[in-house]
Amino acid sequence: MTIPMNGIPLSEHRDWFREMVDLGYTDLWSSEAGGQDGFTPLALAAAWAPEMRLGIAIIPAFTRGPALLAQSVASLAEAAPGRFVMGIGTSSDVIVGNWNGIPFEEPYKRVRDSVAFLRRALAGEKVDEEYESFTVKGFRLQMGSLAVQPPILIAGLRQGMLRLAGKVGDGAILNWLSVEDVRKVVPYVHAGGEGKEIVARLFVIPTADRVKARAIARRGIAAYLNVPVYAAFHEWLGRSDPLKGMWSHWRAGDRKAALEAIPDEVVDQLVIHGAPEECREHVERYRDAGVTTPALAILYADDLRQAVGDLAPR
C-alpha cells in the first residue's frame, strides 16, 4: 500500500499500519513529490509495523546532495534492517527545476552516478571520486558498513532508464502504465539479468460509480501526463493519437477541455476502478504481466478504511 493515506496526518497512522498488518499487506511504499517527504513515513512505519517491508518510490536523484542522500538511506536501512528497499529516479523537470530550483540536466547520468556512489558509501567505503554529474571529496558514513545492504531500484520510463535499472539496479519502479505496457517495458529490465524486482505503483479507485471514478482519474492523468517526461513516455508507448487532444488543450491553457479530451479507453487502461473485486482482478493482471510488487495507491474512496480492507490480499 502507498503511504501516507490521503488526508490522514502522519501522527495518526499507527492504527492504519497495524490494521494493514492484520489484513495481510506485506509492503508500505512512500513517495516524494509535493507532500510528505519519502523517508519520514517509513521511519514511523519501521517502529509501528516491524512486520512490513518498506520501500520508497521514489527519491529524486537531484534534490539531495550525495552525502545527505547516503545518510538518509543508511539511517532508514539501519532502522529497518533487511526490510528497506531504496528507490531512486530522475523525478521530473517540474519537481527538480520548477519546485526546487535545481537544473534538470543529464538525468540519466545523475541516477547512474548516484547508484554507483550509494553502493560504495553504504558499504562503508571512503568515497573520493569525480563522477560525471557530481564530485564527492572524502566522504565516509560514520556508522560504517551496514549489516544489511538495501536493494536499490531505479525508476524507469523509457528504454535507457529501464536498461539501467536492470544493469546497475536490483530492479525497476514503474508508474502510470497499463497491463499491456508492462509487457513492453519489463523485458528491457530483465535484459540486465534475472531476478530483478518490478515494482509498479497502481492507482486505484474502488467504486462502482464509473462516471465518478473516470472524472477523478482524468484529473490524475492530466496532472502527470502533461509533464514532459511522462508525455514522452506515453508517446513511446504509442498513445500519441489518443492523448493529442489533451496535450493540445493543456498547452492552450484550457484545462476543462483537456480533461474532457482524455478517452475513456485510456482512463480504463491507466487507472484501476470498479467494484473492489474488479479492482483486485485488475491488479492480478498486472502481476501476470510481470509486476512482482504491485503498490496500490488509492486515488479516492467513499470510505478509505473500508477500501483498504476490500483491496487487501486474500
Image (cartoon, rainbow, N blue to C red):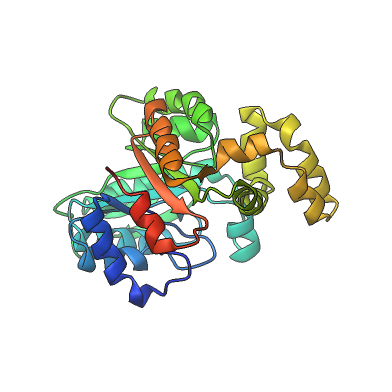
Residue at the spot 45% in from the left edge and 29% down from the top edge? 163
**Residue 187 percent coordinates (x, y):** 43, 23
* Residue sitting farthest toward the left: 147
How many numbered badges does the structure rendering display? 0
Is residue 136 found left or right of 252 in the rendered image? Answer: left
Name the foreground residue: 118 vs 49: 49
**Residue 209 percent coordinates (x, y):** 58, 50
Q: Quadrant of the C terminus?
A: top left
Residue 110, can we see it? yes
- Residue 65 sits above or below residue 297 on the image: below
Name the foreground residue: 185 vs 110: 185
Residue at the spot 76% in from the left edge and 47% down from the top edge? 260
**Residue 296 percent coordinates (x, y):** 41, 49
Residue 141, can we see it? no
- Residue 270 sits above or below residue 183 on the image: below
* Residue sitting farthest toward the bottom: 11
**Residue 54 percent coordinates (x, y):** 29, 54
Is residue 131 found left or right of 193 in the rendered image? Answer: right
- Residue 72 sits above or below residue 114 on the image: below
| Res 28 → quadrant | bottom left
Name the foreground residue: 193 vs 270: 270
- Residue 57 sits above or below residue 175 on the image: below
Name the foreground residue: 245 vs 15: 15
Residue at the spot 53% in from the left edge and 51% down from the top edge? 91
Is residue 295 found left or right of 82 in the rendered image? Answer: right
